[in-house]
Image (spheres, rainbow, N blue to C red):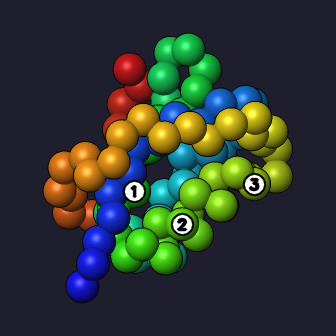
Amino acid sequence: MKRRAIQVGIEGRVQGVGFRAFIEMNAHELGLEGWVRNRRDGSVEAVFQGAPDAVANMLQRCQEGPPASRVTGVEPIGEGVGTFEGFEVRPTV
């Protein structure tokens, strides 16, 4: 089975609005592995690994975000970044 892994930065009003929980819930729903964390600059960073269609779906969901968020950008940081088991919320960096 072909897999894709991508690391992204998500900007806008994405902290204090349940964004990490939104990401974690959607990642589980789509069968993705990886992680999500807040960054001190106010953005959110995440890695999604799984079937290419599921990763593309997750990136679209990131553009929308949870109801209280306002996403202004989802920017790729890197492709093919590691191998993960499960999905976790990591501490802020």
Q: Type of residue at label 2?
A: Ala
Location of mark 3 (residue): 64
Say which of 16 and 64 sits in front: 64
Q: In this view, does 32 lie to the left or right of 45?
A: left
Tell me the residue that label 2 is attached to: 56
Q: Distance between the residues labelled 2 and 3?
A: 13 Å
In which quadrant will I find the N terminus?
bottom left
Cβ–Cβ under 8 Å for marks 2 and 1: no
Mark positioned earlier in the residue sequence (2 or 1): 1
Residue 13 lies in quadrant = top right
Badge 3, how many Cα within 10 Å: few under 14, some, many 20+?
Answer: few
Image coordinates for residue 32, horizontal then vertical, percent = 38, 68
Residue 53 in the image: above or below residue 89: below
Residues tagged 3 and 1 counted as in contact (Cβ below 8 A): no
Q: Which residue lies furthest to the bottom in this view?
A: 1
Considering the numbered disc 2 on the image, is that residue within a helix, a strand or a loop?
helix
- For label 1, the residue is 48
Circle 1 residues within 10 Å: few <14, some 14–19, many ≥20: many
Compared to residue 35, the image places residue 12 above or below, namely above
Residue kind at label 1, given as amino acid type? Phe
Q: Is residue 88 visible?
A: no
Residue drawn where x is 36% and y is 40% of the image:
78
Label 2 or label 1, whichever lies nearer to me, is 2
Position of the C terminus by quadrant: top left
Residue 85 % position (x, y): 20, 63
